[in-house]
Amino acid sequence: MTHETLDAGATLPAEAIDAIERAATAAHPHEELFSARAANIKQSAVRDVFDISMQPGLVSLAGGNPYLQSLPLEKLGQTAARIIAEEGMTALQYGGGQGTEELRQQICQIMAAEGITDALPENVVITAGSQSAQDVATKVFCNPGDVVLVENPTYVGALNTFEAYQVQVEPVEMDDDGLVPELLEARIAALQSEGKNIKFLYTIPNFNNPSGITLAAERRQRIVDICREANIIVLEDNPYGLLRFDGHPIAPMRAANPDDVIYLGSFSKIFAPGLRIGWALVPAHLQRRFYLASEAVTLCPPPLNQMLVSAYLRDYDWEGQIDTYRALYAERCKALLSALEEHMPAGLTWTRPDGGFFVWVTLPEGVDTYPLLGKAIDAGVVFIPGAAFSPADGPSNKLRLAFSAVPPDTIAEGVRRLAPVLADAIEATNEGAPQ
Amino acid sequence: MTHETLDAGATLPAEAIDAIERAATAAHPHEELFSARAANIKQSAVRDVFDISMQPGLVSLAGGNPYLQSLPLEKLGQTAARIIAEEGMTALQYGGGQGTEELRQQICQIMAAEGITDALPENVVITAGSQSAQDVATKVFCNPGDVVLVENPTYVGALNTFEAYQVQVEPVEMDDDGLVPELLEARIAALQSEGKNIKFLYTIPNFNNPSGITLAAERRQRIVDICREANIIVLEDNPYGLLRFDGHPIAPMRAANPDDVIYLGSFSKIFAPGLRIGWALVPAHLQRRFYLASEAVTLCPPPLNQMLVSAYLRDYDWEGQIDTYRALYAERCKALLSALEEHMPAGLTWTRPDGGFFVWVTLPEGVDTYPLLGKAIDAGVVFIPGAAFSPADGPSNKLRLAFSAVPPDTIAEGVRRLAPVLADAIEATNEGAPQ
């Protein structure tokens, strides 16, 4: 990981950096060996600021890291010790490519808590986070030039994965209730009339990353019906679903549509991302292809990590821990929204999420948030510019603020630091002056 | 994972099973959504017998599992406990996509022990075993239809990975000293004269899986020179290099050729496969593309697993443990070779490896080992049929025996059980009768 892109963020566009790097390698004859897809594999803007976010003194509202301090680490350590001492022959050895039977059964129980009551362990494939499940889905379904539909905005890591397979990523607009069914339907019709092969719709219906927006319950079946009618699979990514601040979860689209939806879950937000354990619940008729493609990349998910998750689900109050997280993230979200009310200049709007990790801020038209990142870092705060979350890669007047990893006081301080940077940019835009 | 292929092994060819499965899903309109590459993603024959190998009473000479019983599990458990209790905020959180700096430095020291003395941590990318590094290399370099050269025979998992990218895998013959330079040169010339794009040569120079053959020291530079001249990258996979029974390692091809070789290493054989930690040492001019492609699949390798490996390399006598493994595997290899001498019928030959996990047995021409697997299982022993290790997928008169996971007495018993199955097959072939 390098800081070049970031340090040069305010002056050098990404294309210029790419050109410099290409020039550095162009002399080598290996340059001609790269695959066509290699040019499409880019650094994620989130990873870009990963290292710099760790600098002391800087308030990072950039990374969507879960807050792990509330985990019972001492006890988890003892659990890991017992697994290795007593079951090390299994935990440290190669395991099955689909994941352990025990964990797949437990995952079915977790999904039941979200409203999916008919999942079978044999249709669960354990993956390296849900990131890897996105990769497998694209591998199994997409030829170069095929279309993947996404919400606009959507998760930057998914965009990077899709683009690595040379697919055409087509964003569909959301409103405050999430993806708009009529716009989805119109987009599908337009693309299919051009002869495009649309393979799947990737959607984060609960507390979308980066927008925080939730797809309204009454729209969900309609979205699935539209996709079924057009023979398009729904790839429902739900890492934050259990982290709703209040009330009960809205049933996932998968719940009533077992044949139409590949459902992705993850322990990254409800337990620990560093274990890299996620899963896909795959329709029975797609399971074998999905599982083989997953196995071909890594042979098997790490048994030690799976057994630690299993022990956590079996022997710990994991549901109580989720309640702790919900209260914690609700408090932090409230702190962020209050600070935005208090400090932000006129002309800004932002979302008010019901759960998850993110608030999405919209600046006035004409303000590009990417060049503001360098100025924000100088002011001691980091965010992710909106352009990262859209396949278009053009200028964006949006930015993502993550409240998950930062205590309320620090959130407020971060917003205080950010406000004048945004105010200056708005003023400069209003005056028509260069920023 | 299912046993269908195996149980039906003696009667149903893989194509028939595929056809049955296709028929089962063909009714669903999703069938038309699969990518072209999905049809190329197959079950590995090794994974096929993974579950059945675990059945009590059966002697498995199939899986190349390392023998973990000699690891200090109690102490390793305490190390994991300390990492989680004291450094859990790092171990359980997202980490850098390239892997931790500490582990990449330690990996450079391991490679120095094998003869690579100029490796820099910034050119090391940590991956989910070297399996994942093979996947990344194919992703970064290969378009559909490009050619990958492999030794014949070669690692079945690598074949599966390459075929998932729709490459043309071209085997080059070996003799007792490994890949034959003249045959490599001729094959490259022939393919390039057909206008083929050859991207890399995948080779396991030390104790090749499955053959156990080592590429002679005096051939190594010649192989690299041939590839350099043709602008073909060498992908040198060396998971067994430190497991030479006697004497010093032969210098890897990477040692004297930092710009021409991507070197793959793994902790699966020298420590623990269940952690799924391997690495690629990538030429500086290829590092960025390789690293980004790796990150796009999993975001980051699991920090807990990396920290456990780092602690093992820092605080344990890992070199002493490798000496233990060398003596252990040498004894088992000797037991296997003795049992083959004692029990095998006339007409068979086999390799005599200097290290690693495998012996490669050749039966007389005309005997196909795939239909023998079912009979061997009935006799209480499992092996891997030779067809798995060649892209051609046709009948093969070879089979792989793994000695790594089984004590000497059990190895001898396995060979005793296998011998009559092979003798019967040879007799039936000699009589021209159906087997």
Image: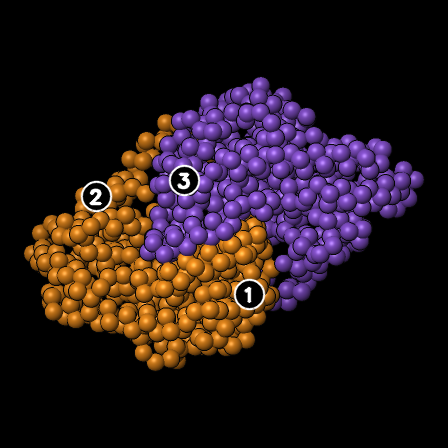
Chain colours: A orange, B purple
Number of the label disc, if any, that sits on residue B99: none
> Disc 1 marks which residue?
A102
Whichever of callouts 2 and 1 sits on the residue coming sooner in the sequence is 2
Q: CA distance from mark 3 to mark 2?
A: 34 Å
Q: Position of residue A232 (x, y in %)?
A: 49, 65
Quarter holding the N terminus of chain B? bottom right
> Disc 2 marks which residue?
A7
Whether callout 3 and callout 2 share a subunit is answered: no
Disc number lying in front (3 or 2): 3
Can residue B164 be spotted in the picture? no
* Circle 3/circle 1 CB separation < 8 Å: no
> Disc 3 marks which residue?
B314
Whether callout 3 and callout 1 share a subunit is answered: no
**Tag 3: amino acid:** Arg
Q: Toward the viewer: B283 or A126?
A: A126
- In this rendering, the answer to whether B198 lies above or below B309 is above
